[in-house]
Amino acid sequence: MEITQLNGVGPALAAKLAKLGLHQVEDLLFHLPLRYQDRTRVTPLHALTPRSQHLVDGQITSSALQRGRRVSLRVSISQNGAHLGLRFMHFHANQAKSFTEGRNIRCFGEVRPGPQGLEMVHPEYQLFDDTPPPLADQLTPIYPTTEGISVVRIGQLIELAWQQLEHQRLHIEELLPQQLIKQYQLPSLQSSLQQLHYPKVGVDIQQLESQVTPAKLRLVLEELIAHQLTLSRAKQQTQSLPAPALAAVQNLEQQFIQQLPFSLTGAQRRVWSEIMADVSQPLPMVRMVQGDVGSGKTVVAALAACRAVDNGCQVAVLAPTEILAEQHLHNFKHWLEPLGVTVVWLTGKQKTKPKRDALAAIANGTAQIVIGTHALFQDSVEYQHLGLAVIDEQHRFGVAQRHCLVAKAPPNCGLHQLVMTATPIPRTLAMSAYGDLDHSVIDELPPGRKPINSVLLNNVRRADVIERVHQACASGQQAYWICPLIETSEVLQCEAAEDTALLLGQQLQGVNVGLVHGRLAAADKAQVMAQFKAGEIQLLVATTVIEVGVDVPNANLMVIDNAERLGLAQLHQLRGRVGRGQAQSHCLFMYQAPLSRMGRERLDILRQSNDGFVIAEKDLQLRGPGEVLGTRQAGAIGLRVADLIRDAHLLPQVKSMTSTYASHPAKTDQLIARWVGDNQIFSKV
């Protein structure tokens, strides 16, 4: 039933509702509340608790304008000797005049401590004489909304949809397997929806919002199954075209292994065998390799590239930044050019002739391995026979960008895809966000690597830290000084780094200080990095642009300024730039006091653990899945009622339940339409 069939829903309103994924009347029933407000009872003023919402009645005792940086309206109300302040920053003259002494008022809002006691800022209110307004007869649901549609209007539309259901003009089908309904003794779908949209008076709001009641569990299971089915379908679509079966023909990878100055770890060998089992099949490999910083993912990617080249296929190695791409270029050239493999560089900032030569080599097949940034999937790039794509730090790319690279495969052919991340993703998150990928984990660091010693230091000890950097550089070591984003401006971030580099250059006599940030020209950036790698620069001041892709074994000390401003995963990534040699390495996390309780807890985790997966699990608990995946992937989970942390224990059973839908494609379509709709961004690559 189209949503325009509801009274009052014309084309303009329908277009706004479509932004919320609401196209059918049934969609409104599954547009669930974010939270609830209790307007069913009045709280006496003497019983108010700060930082919670209350409905209150009182009598106005005073009203006055307060002048400061801006004019505000301060209203005082009382009830049986207790008082509450109301504060308005935005108001008009007639509104101010209406707050006359002695009038009765009902307010709803959040109570918070104010300069003169408890207060509400911009509460909703009604003035009344002797008879107070009627109380709500149920909890008030607060729905997700969008520009041009109020929460009240959404509630009215949901009420209209509910009437259609009750009058049997609308039918919602039960799509959960009966065995699951019986196993968990779940209520019917209609009853579950009713309990969430229209909870009864007396239900505890905190319990309703945080706990999984049988009504909520009914919808949690259905939503999780819908998401798993979507991921399974995405994987089927990815593997719908044949890919070249890559056999061990000339053993280029064995030559590569033999010339390495180190032995592969057991974890690298295990992951390598998993990749080889995939690419030997005539189906596209879609595998994610997770590995902590320094675990050797690039070597495994190079082995996969050797197998592809052995079979006459080209390889594209895609990185999100030029610094990381240049690091791959250096490694692949150093490892593979002595074995006769042609490695070509392609980025958007190349000059005309080198770019033209690179494009020609890619088109005629001379370029066997192509390394670069977003330029690899531009329209002007034509591959002769692309067989493998290696995508590093895959979460930095949008889905559409990765599909553009997949489209560079030969006509009617699939592409083997190896996606790598040094940002450990908790198993719970990986199952739900990347369920369309096979997973490998390199969970072993190369022998000889010492754990990085991590120290938390108050910014007041800055002089001591500078002296420590001086001593390290004087002894022949190198160091990083990281200036994180201070405000949401790359310009300000770079200015902070420039100022820091200037000050340190003045204070550290005899130390050559270099500077790298995101706004530096590519050639200048490359020159500074080359000087740092060569040991000509002892101290590198940088923004978070060096988070990945920088490998300087002699750099054993890192200072991170304002560490409390960065996320756990990013801090761990930055720390991973040291500890790459045999010497003991140190990372100093400098923070600005006072630290919040959570800020202290986060930094303590880094001090206590060097394990990226332990840190990632804690990060998931503290910040939630959208933040851990990054802003680009925040919508990739898009769960409305399920919670990945709270409901993690259900995922294994949910995953197994998806097989029961194999013989019911119609139900699969309905379930995906109900919970995922047109949000088809689960197909990650």
Image (spheres, rainbow, N blue to C red):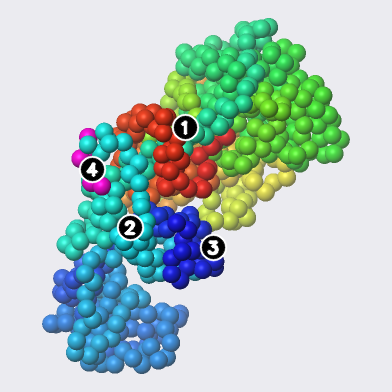
**Labels 2, 3: front one:** 2
- Dot 2: what SS? loop
- Separation of marks 2 and 3 at Cα, in angstroms: 26 Å
Q: Which residue type carries mark 1?
A: Ser
The structure residue drawn at horizontal position 80% and vertical position 27%, both measured from the top left corner, is: 363
Task: From the viewer's perspective, tell me whether residue 63 is left or right of residue 419.
Answer: left
Q: Position of residue 313 (x, y in %)?
A: 70, 19
**Labels 1, 2: front one:** 2
The residue carrying pointer 3 sits among few (fewer than 14), some (14 to 19) or many (20 or more) residues within 10 Å by Cα, namely some
One can see residue 445 in this view: yes
The structure residue drawn at horizontal position 47% and vertical position 23%, both measured from the top left corner, is: 440
Q: Tag 1 or tag 3, which sits nearer the N-term?
A: 3
Q: Please say if the residues under marks 1 and 2 sit with CB atoms less than 8 Å apart.
A: no
Mark 3 lies on residue: 15
Task: From the viewer's perspective, tell me whether residue 173 is left or right of residue 296.
Answer: left
Mark 2 lies on residue: 168
Mark 1 lies on residue: 232
Mark 4 lies on residue: 186
Q: Please say if the residues under marks 4 and 1 sit with CB atoms less than 8 Å apart.
A: no
Q: Which residue type carries mark 3?
A: Ala
- Dot 1: what SS? helix
User: Is residue 468 inside the magenta stretch?
Assistant: no
Task: From the viewer's perspective, tell me whether residue 375 is left or right of residue 53.
Answer: right
What's drawn in magenta, residue-wise? Answer: 183-188
- Dot 4: what SS? loop
* Residue, far left: 80
Q: Where is residue 95 in the image (x, y as percent from the top left)?
A: 38, 88
The residue carrying pointer 1 sits among few (fewer than 14), some (14 to 19) or many (20 or more) residues within 10 Å by Cα, namely many
